[in-house]
Amino acid sequence: MPALAAYLPNFLLSRFKRTSNCFILRLSLDVHVDHIFVHLCIEDIICLRRVNKAFFLLTHEPIIWKRFLERMNIPMPPIRPSFRYSLQATDFEVEQLVTRAISLDDNWRRTYPNIFSRQLVMAHYKILDMKLLPGGKYLVASVKDSSSYRFYLTVFALDHPKGHRALARFPTGAKVYNLQAKYMKFNDRQGIMVAYVRRTFKNDTPVDPSDYSYRTTIDPPAPFCYESMCLHISLDSLELLVDPQVVPGSAEFVKRAASQPPPFLEVAYLEADLHIESLSLFDFNGMPYLAVAQQPDEVVIIDLTSNVISTMICGQYHPHVGQPHRIEAIRILPGQKDILVVRTITTSPTSKLHLVEIFDAPEGGGMTLRHAKDIYTIQDKNAVSFHISDYGIPGTTGDQPKLRHMNGPPPPISIFFRTVDPIGVAHHVIWPAHFEIPATTTRAAETRYFYNLDHVTDQSFHVSTPHVTHVLPGAYRALMYTISSEDRKDAPSLVSLRRYINPEIQYTDYPVPKVDTAEPVTRRERHPMPWNVYSSLKMPQHVQQVYQQGGVAAITWDESIGRVCIAAEDEMKIRILDFAQMIQPDARFAQWKRSQAFLHSE
């Protein structure tokens, strides 16, 4: 690797020379970065930043923060596939990743977390549904114009040094809901896969199906036809437009946008008479798939590359054959070709039994009947809705680091369910199991992790009477909001916003993974688990009033960075609340960055 000095401007080089009056400045830049800074904690680097201008600039060097990133031993946001470790345009993001992860972990474990920043995105359309991509850089939203005549999918870029902005949109023809978005590769191109559901009437009906709410059970004037569609958005095109060196709206920006093909590629389409629910995007062996639930007992998996459709009929639970079974939620288990299914059995007019089951996923097309190979029962809980976390296992490309926490066990799977009588919310966790593969003469020993139902633990139960609690699930961090039990509006008024942290209760026989003995990146120890895993969040009064008067039209949560985006019914705006502090690029070293670019071009 060439000496660091070759990439730094003369101003900085002139401060570190053998004739300096300050003895520490007589050491070369390579000695500081490669031999001294590697033994320092983040607090030490920040203190050095305050010494003088030379150390202020030097401590912003990306290599310093890349080393911290590789040593982090707390939950980290997944790195998006387009992030290039060696690309100068992403240098400013590395320090953001490190400081944001530490700030969120510290804040979320406090007795009463703080909202560190509030931002506003002018959407210019009414928001119907939203989905944040992991890491919070992109937001996909279902929107409509003020006359409810035109409907679009819009992709927003967040955290850009020049401000948040819309990048692309796709006309959907009708209101779409159950919006899902995930970083996935399609035809060897990295991108964002988007899936959604929309409804049309089977017969010619003068009523617009978009006028009906999808959140409540209705009696429409004609039967609905349900359509699910998948779109793929090229990340190369989006990253070209969010280059921090290019000013949005400039001639260069327009030139780049005009040179790109249409950003949305239609990948798959599914039409059904049955209600389509619980959309789940996943990949297996690098190939993209979509799974959906069709009531009452079918799971449909679409191979998005070949468009082969495989349908699984969930066999009835033997002790209750003949009684009504209904799928509540599904999730594909990451790294396994298994399906996690939550079902409800109505055992009598006044009682229900809830099942958490694991099935072998169907493949090869056609329809098959399958029975669960693993079952966990939830009794004495009258649940009305279930929510499963989807933290996922972040992958890496050849130009990305393999982070320390990715070598350990995958995150737990959280299952939240809302109950009635009493009104509240319960939380159960599926902990990953593992087995050891012994070393051979050609291969080192390896630990393999997988999910089964041997280590499911009941974490908590919270009574929220008289308010109804809605859950935005997370493996470690969930966000909840409460509404009045009497509120029947499509956009209900917000009563409170609440933090929930997974207490991480494990049974004594759980095979606890090895403790990470890596050297910490900070001086302070991690905050202990708070006593109040549920706690109300204090929002500014004027923000609270917006959602009390206008109601919550759409809300999305990214637990990996502690960000929630909320849209009110009567506004054309998206409000962003961050529970982690984030360092934005500093204007004081903008000239230094330009000097670096000049030196690189020589």
Image (cartoon, grey):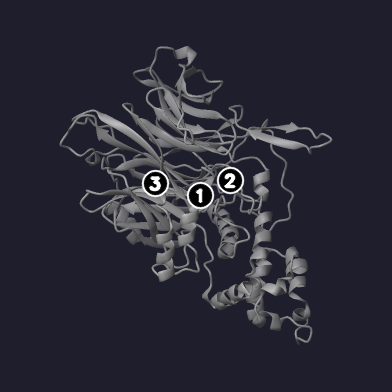
Q: Residue furthest left?
A: 206
Q: Earlier in the sequence, mark 2 or mark 3?
A: 2
> Which amino acid does the dot numbered 3 rest on?
Tyr
Camera sees residue 109: yes
Q: Are marks 2 and 1 in contact (CB under 8 Å)?
A: yes
Q: With respect to residue 171, does 204 lie above or below?
A: above
Report, in whole angstroms, how far the alpha carbon at label 1 lies from the one at label 3. Answer: 21 Å
Labels 1 and 3: the sequence-earlier one: 1
524 w.r.t. 28: above or below: above
Instruction: Look at label 2 and name its amino acid.
Output: Pro
- On the image, numbered disc 1 is attached to which residue? 134
Percent from the top left, x then y, of residue 174? 27, 42
The answer for how far apart the CA atoms under marks 2 and 3 are is: 28 Å
Q: Residues within 10 Å of mark 2 (few under 14, many from 20)?
A: some
315 relative to 30, above or below: above
Residue 90 image point, x, y percent: 56, 62
Residue sitting at x 46%, y 59%? 115
Image quadrant containing the C terminus: bottom right
Q: Which element type, helix, strand or loop, lies under badge 3?
A: strand
Q: Position of residue 244 (x, y in %)?
A: 50, 66
Q: Is residue 128 left or right of residue 601?
A: left
The numbered disc on residue 394 is 2
- For label 2, the SS is loop
Q: Quadrant of the N terminus?
A: bottom right
Instruction: Give the residue pinned by disc 3.
Output: 481
Q: Nearer the viewer, residue 457 or 467?
A: 457
The disc labelled 1 sits on which kind of residue? Pro
Element at label 1: loop
Q: Residue at x 21, y 31 (%)?
A: 220
Q: CA distance from mark 2 to mark 1?
A: 9 Å
Q: Nearer the viewer, mark 1 or mark 3?
A: 1
